[in-house]
Structure formats: C-alpha cells, structure tokens
Amino acid sequence: MNEKLCQYLDDLACRIDENQESGLHQTWDDFLDNKLTEGCFKPNKRKPSPSQLDWLPVPVNDTLHDPQLMVYEQFRMISDELAKGGNALLNVRCNYGVSIMTSQLGCKVIEMPVGQDNTPTAQALPDEYAIQAVIDAGLPDLRAGQGADVWDTADLFLQIMDRWPVLGRWVSLYHPDTQGPMDNAELAWGSEIFLAFYDSPQRVHDFLELMTQHYIAFLTKWFALVPTPNFSTHWGLKVPGKIVLRDDSLMNLSPEIYAEFIRDYEVRCLRELGGGMIHFCGRGDHFIEQMSQMQSDGLNAINMSQPHLNDMETIYRNTVDKGVKIIGFDTDWANKAITAGRDLHGKVACPYW
C-alpha cells in the first residue's frame, strides 16, 4: 500500500466512534429480530465527524484498473458518511459493476464514458451458437474476466482490515455485484432471451442452470475468503441473510415464465448460500406472491425501488403481512401507508431520511 493511502486510512480509523457504530448496529439487530411491531424503522444518524484531509473523488473508470484506487474510493464514501453524520452502516465492496459474472463467460466488458462516472456493463454474446458453446464449456475459471480484479481487491481490503482493526470491526466487506441467474442470463444472451423463452426453452433452462451453478460457485468462494455472518450489509443496509439476488429483468416477464424458468433456480441460490434478500427495480407486484412463497427457502426480505409502478397493497400483502421485510424502502411511501392506516407490522426499514 502506498503511503498516501495509509494516511487516509489512518484518518478514517481515528474518526470512527465505536460506541455510535455499536448502537447503530444494535438498532438494526432489534429491527431484524422483530422487536419493532408497528410503524417503520428509521435508524438514528451519527454525530458528524469531519476529516482534516481532502478526500477527493476518483473517477470510476480509474478505479477499475488500480486496486488501491478502488479501495480508496470505497473508503472515501465512508469518510463522506462520517463527515455528514449519516446513518448508513459502514461497508465497502469490490465495485466492478454488473459485468463481473458475464465477463467470465467471454462477454466483453463495456466501460462507460468517463463523464458518466458509472460502473461497466457487458456486451452480450453474438448468437445462440455462442450461448451453446458457453453451456457446453461448463463452469468458467473464477479468476477469468474481472474475477482476478475482484479477488485481488478483496485481498487488499482484508489486509487493510487486519492492519487497521477498528476498520475491520465496523466496516463490512460485502459481496460484489454478482447479480442473479436471470439477470446474468439476460446480460450474456441479450434481449433475444425474451423470445428464446418461447423459441428455445430447453436452451434457456440449460443456460439458467449454468448461471445458477456459476453464481453459487462464485459466492461460495467469496464466503470462504470473506466470512459473512447471517446478517450481512449491502448499500449501508443490514440484510437478514448472506446474499442479495438482483431481479431487475423480471419486470419484463410474466408470472408464468417466472414460475417455469426462474423461481427454482433462485430457491437453490437462497438455500445453498444462506438466504438473504431479493432486489428488483420497476414493477414487481405480478410475481411477488410467488416470490413470497420462498420464505422457507431463505427469502427474508425484499429491496424495491419505484413503488409508484406497483400496486403496493399487493406488495404489502405478500411481504410484511407474511413476515417478509422490506428493507431500504422510500420513507414518503411508508409514511403514506401508515397515515392511511396500513399496518406495516414494524417490518419496513426506511434508512434514507
């Protein structure tokens, strides 16, 4: 590690108030342990702890090619959280974008224009012949594509947390953006996959089977390297379980397609990896009932955006009414429900207020 990075890490370690961090985690634990029985959970904010150093942002594209810049930028966001007195839990990740898994299948990593300052995406494979070749090849090397960057950066994070024990105690290294079987399948196959559900159903099943094996193998390796308790953190939120499955592709699919092609693969991921939370953007009220039936398989919470695109009564009936938490929810929408007399059972977390 270079000397300048060490100076920033020294600064950060000195600014962490362990009593505040302990108290913040305890309030989350109380929420996750169902000690809140009404309303919604809003964690307290810290006392601001500004830095004496200038933590200047680094463009995302630069961090993709230098592990020390990657860890600096992740810790810079923690510095900002401490400086403003925010209430997000302190966490970092190997932030290489949605392309990690598909890059291991041979998909080209597409970096965004510098001014956009966003993580990469993946270019889909050219045709179904290429898809079949990937299926035939089986599980890829877990250091292929962006894999080597992920594992090497994770090693650097672990070295830092060992050298600065206060960071090791209060900063969580959460699993990278491994998406989920369906989202990875869409990234690698492209939008043609939506026709393939009808035109090539067996090939879609074979591809999703590979995506599931790949997802489980990658995160099994991750948890062996980075031991993760039953409560993990993602995006400053505390999650009941070890994984966060992404399901952004589902807004385009019918409940019937979800049941026939996707649900069983997600059940395997939850069962084999210790349960967790499912995230989806856009509309999800058309599949939420089937998703809620995965509670016994380890689905403990959902994280959703854009509640205005959903029939929220359908969402509430199939989440909080059944004991599935909604974590990272919009405060205005939670308040709207409470004002209307809707019982949220104390199972909704609105941390960004």
Image (cartoon, rainbow, N blue to C red):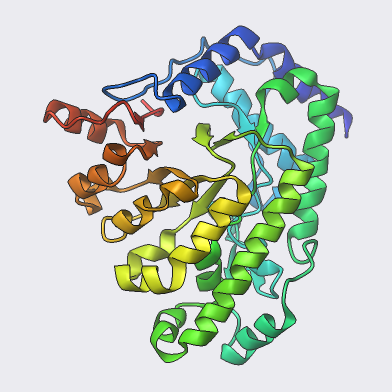
Residue 65 in the figure: left or right of residue 183 = right
Answer whether residue 292 is visible to the viewer in this image. Answer: yes
Quadrant (top left/top right/bottom left/bottom right) for the C terminus: top left
Residue 321 in the figure: left or right of residue 82 = left
Q: Residue at x 37, y 53 (%)?
A: 293
| Res. 250 image quadrant | bottom left
Q: Position of residue 351 (x, y in %)?
A: 41, 27
Q: Position of residue 218 (x, y in %)?
A: 70, 57
Quadrant (top left/top right/bottom left/bottom right) for the N terminus: top right
| Res. 184 image quadrant | bottom right
Q: Residue at x 71, y 52 (%)?
A: 220
Residue 278 in the figure: left or right of residue 173 = left
Residue sitting farthest toward the left: 340
Answer whether residue 115 is visible to the viewer in this image. Answer: no
Q: Residue at x 57, y 89 (%)?
A: 128
As drawn, 174 above or below 28: below
Q: Position of residue 340 (x, y in %)?
A: 11, 30
Seen from the viewer's position, the closer of residues 143 and 324 is 324
Q: Residue at x 31, y 43 (%)?
A: 319
As drawn, 286 above or below 53: below
Number of callouts in the render?
0
Seen from the viewer's position, the closer of residues 330 and 137 is 137
As drawn, 201 above or below 117: below
Q: Position of residue 327 (x, y in %)?
A: 40, 36
Residue sitting farthest toward the right: 2
Residue 3 in the figure: left or right of residue 276 = right
